[in-house]
Each structure stands twice: as structure tokens, then as C-alpha cells.
């Protein structure tokens, strides 16, 4: 009996060590799936999580691009730009249906989201709420920063629909339509992307080097 107790006592520190290491590893993995500035999901983590949600249908996918962000950076500095990005993330995290909201920062001032949605009326409400939230002035150093937002959204009301990649492309096209019209929202019920892509991004979008026409043109 004494030998057994001695062995157990010796094993306890080792077990505790493995538990701490396992917890540390889980935290490292989770941190790698989060944008370090905003705490939102990264593109890869969003694609994985939102892909599963969209596959079940009755979902909306949103692409968000801030308007005037470069001017904020150029005029007020990168600290001001970070404040805008952080405020955008906080507003995304507090928007929409809490249990079904998935939000991410894709990079720069580009964000994405996915939610459950039952019908067109609910999509319009969610998108309008999002646009109003994102265009509120951002407090900064005793003043405020003005920034706009262009939001594109596409929804699948059936129990299944296209893959997330196609929906993101379509939402991106809708977002750029909103941007061309001065910001705000653009909704679409056409699930198939219209424009060609380059390296997985709509031709003409930032980050591509080939266009199918003048920047901002839509078929």
C-alpha cells in the first residue's frame, strides 16, 4: 500500500505538468486563430467555422469594407487607425444574433461575418443595423473619428446552398456595389458569383493584379 501511495505521489507532479502543457497548447492554438489586434477570427478560422454553419442552410454571409480608413491613417496616424479597427471589431461582436454570429477580420480594413437568417426582412434588418453601427463616430484622444462602411450580403434561405467560398465572392461583389454607390448596404439573392476571380478573389479587388474591366465595373 505504501508503495502504491508513493508511486501516486510521484506521478502527481507529472500529471499536473501535462495538464498545464495541454492548457498552454490549447491557448496557443486558439491565439493563432485570432487576429492579434481585434481578437476576431482569422480568415482560415472563419472559413472553417462559417463553412459548417452555411452548409446547414438558412444563413447569410456578409463582407464589410471600411470607407475612409486610409484617410484616417494618413491624417491621424496608425494609432487612430487601430482605434477604428478595434471599435469595428467590438461593434461586430455585439451585433446580430449572439448565438449564431461568426465574425472575422480578413486583413486591413476588410471584415467578414455569417449569421443565421430566416427571410429577406430579417436580412435587411440585420444588414441595416450593422451599417448604422459601423458608421458611428469612433472616440479617439478626446475627439472622434469619422469612418464609413460598405456592406455586401447574400443569403441562403433554403436548407442548403452553395459553398462558403462562392457566397463570400458574391457578398464581396455586393459590397463593392455598395462602395461604388457611396457606401451603405447592398443585398443580393443571386447565389452564383458574377465576376471572375484571381487567386480566389474577385478580379479588380484589392490584392489582385488582373481585372476583367475598369476597377469598380460590374457586369
Image (cartoon, rainbow, N blue to C red):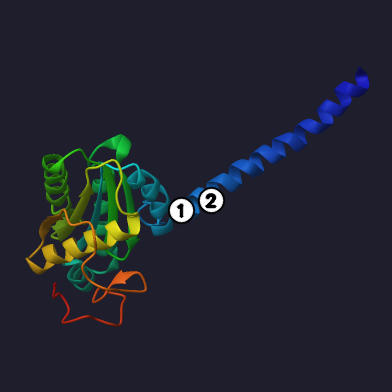
Q: Residue furthest left?
A: 181
Q: Find residue 105 and report its horizontal and vertical position in percent.
A: 33, 57
The residue pinned by badge 2 equals: 29
Label number found at residue 33: 1
Relative to 66, 14 lies left or right: right
How far apart marks 1 and 2 lie (CA) works out to 7 Å
Q: Residue at x 28, y 82 (%)?
A: 210
Query: Helix or strand or loop: what does disc 1 sit on?
Result: loop
The answer to the question of whether label 1 and label 2 lie on touching residues, with beta carbons closer than 8 A, is yes
Q: Nearer the viewer, residue 6 or 107?
A: 107
The structure residue drawn at horizontal position 34% and vertical position 59%, both measured from the top left corner, is 165
In percent of the image, x 77 and y 31: which residue is there?
12
Quadrant position of the C terminus in the picture:
bottom left
What is the secondary structure assignment of the residue under circle 2? helix
* Front-lying residue, 213 or 134: 213
Q: Quadrant of residue 19?
A: top right
The residue sitting at 12% across, 49% down in the picture is 132
Q: Nearer the viewer, residue 110 or 152?
A: 152
- List x then y, in percent, for residue 124: 12, 45
Kindly indicate the quadrant of the structure image that contains residue 216.
Answer: bottom left
Expressed as whole percent of the image width and height from the top left, the position of residue 65 reads 22, 62
Image quadrant containing the N terminus: top right
Amino acid at each position: 500500500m505504501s508503495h502504491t501511495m508513493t508511486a501516486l505521489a510521484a506521478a502527481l507532479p507529472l500529471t499536473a505538468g501535462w495538464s498545464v502543457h495541454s492548457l498552454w497548447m490549447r491557448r496557443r492554438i486558439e491565439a493563432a486563430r485570432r487576429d492579434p489586434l481585434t481578437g476576431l477570427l482569422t480568415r482560415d478560422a472563419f472559413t472553417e467555422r462559417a463553412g459548417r454553419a452555411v452548409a446547414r442552410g438558412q444563413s447569410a454571409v456578409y463582407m464589410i469594407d471600411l470607407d475612409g480608413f486610409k484617410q484616417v491613417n494618413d491624417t491621424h496616424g496608425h494609432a487612430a487607425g487601430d482605434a477604428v479597427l478595434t471599435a469595428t471589431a467590438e461593434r461586430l461582436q455585439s451585433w446580430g444574433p449572439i448565438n449564431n454570429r461568426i465574425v472575422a477580420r480578413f486583413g486591413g480594413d476588410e471584415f467578414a461575418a455569417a449569421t443565421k437568417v430566416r427571410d429577406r426582412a430579417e436580412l435587411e434588418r440585420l444588414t441595416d443595423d450593422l451599417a448604422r453601427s459601423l458608421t458611428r463616430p469612433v472616440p479617439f484622444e478626446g475627439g472622434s473619428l469619422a469612418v464609413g462602411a460598405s456592406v455586401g450580403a447574400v443569403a441562403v434561405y433554403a436548407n442548403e446552398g452553395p459553398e462558403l467560398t462562392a457566397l463570400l465572392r458574391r457578398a464581396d461583389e455586393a459590397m463593392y456595389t455598395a462602395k461604388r454607390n457611396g457606401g451603405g448596404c447592398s443585398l443580393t439573392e443571386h447565389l452564383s458569383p458574377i465576376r471572375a476571380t484571381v487567386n480566389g478573389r474577385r478580379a479588380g479587388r484589392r490584392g489582385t493584379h488582373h481585372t476583367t474591366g475598369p476597377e469598380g465595373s460590374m457586369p
